[in-house]
Image (cartoon, grey):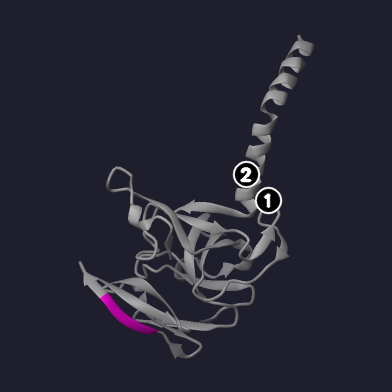
Amino acid sequence: MSLFKNKKASKFWKENKSLFVFISLMLVFRSAVADWNDVPTGSMKPTIVEGDRIYVDKLAYDLRLPFTLHSLIKISDPERNDIIIFESAVADKRLVKRVIGIPGDIVSMKNNQLYINGQAADYQLVKSHNNENIMQEVLENSSHNIRLNINASSLANFASVKVPQGQYLVLGDNRDNSADSRVIGFVPRGEIIGRSNKVVISLDYDNYFFPRSERFLLDI
């Protein structure tokens, strides 16, 4: 009986070896090179919305040992304004946020206005709708849109903090509705798994998961 089972297993392996190799290579690729990440919450609105599947460049900062967070080769460090994906030990889940403070920066916020190393960020109103404002925020000549409640939340202010070496201060673009560094603290460099700059596909949760064609391959 054992010999019969071994022959069947051997035959099964020979007939499906190419499939198993392909699946294994795909898993390694998704673990160490590139992947996509589902975004179930609105903490990064208006840049990223619920239902977006964003591209994750896992070689942006490190070449990692597949299936781990162990860095084999450091490629670069996150920069201000990067949208990063990280495995938060404090939140106990994967999060997507924007890098605001890099190591050595002194950062504060007053009434939802950022100050970085003594310089105030610039803001321009893009549109106002349903007690919310969409603002263009300019940090070091790079701009992106953020979402603010007209009635600011308790997250709208924090005193000056210096970002420690090897850590990063991150915020969600939906500033009054994001559990970011104001809640979970600084993000260690070792938790960061990649960078995103594009939506791959997007499904509308409020419309029977129909695709949002206007968001396919959208730069963010």
Instruction: Give the percent coordinates (x, y) of residue 167.
Output: 60, 72
Q: Earlier in the sequence, mark 1 or mark 2?
A: 2
Magenta span includes 107: no
Tell whether label 2 touches label 1 (CB within 8 Å): yes
Residue at the spot of label 1 = 66
Q: Split into 4 quadrants, where in the image is the C terminus?
A: bottom left
Q: Would residue 220 appear left or right of 124 to someone viewing this image?
A: right
Q: Residues within 10 Å of mark 2 (few under 14, many from 20)?
A: some
The answer to whether residue 157 of the structure is visible from this angle is no
Q: What is the C-alpha distance between the residues marked 1 and 2?
A: 9 Å
Amino acid type assigned to the residue bearing label 2 in the image: Leu
Residue stretch in magenta: 122-126
**Quadrant, the N terminus:** top right
Numbered circle sitting on residue 27: 2
Disc 1 is placed on an element classified as loop
Comparing 40 with 107, the one in front is 40
> Hey, what amino acid is under mark 1?
Pro
Residue 131 image position (x, y, % from top left):
21, 69
Residue farthest to the bottom, as pictured: 118
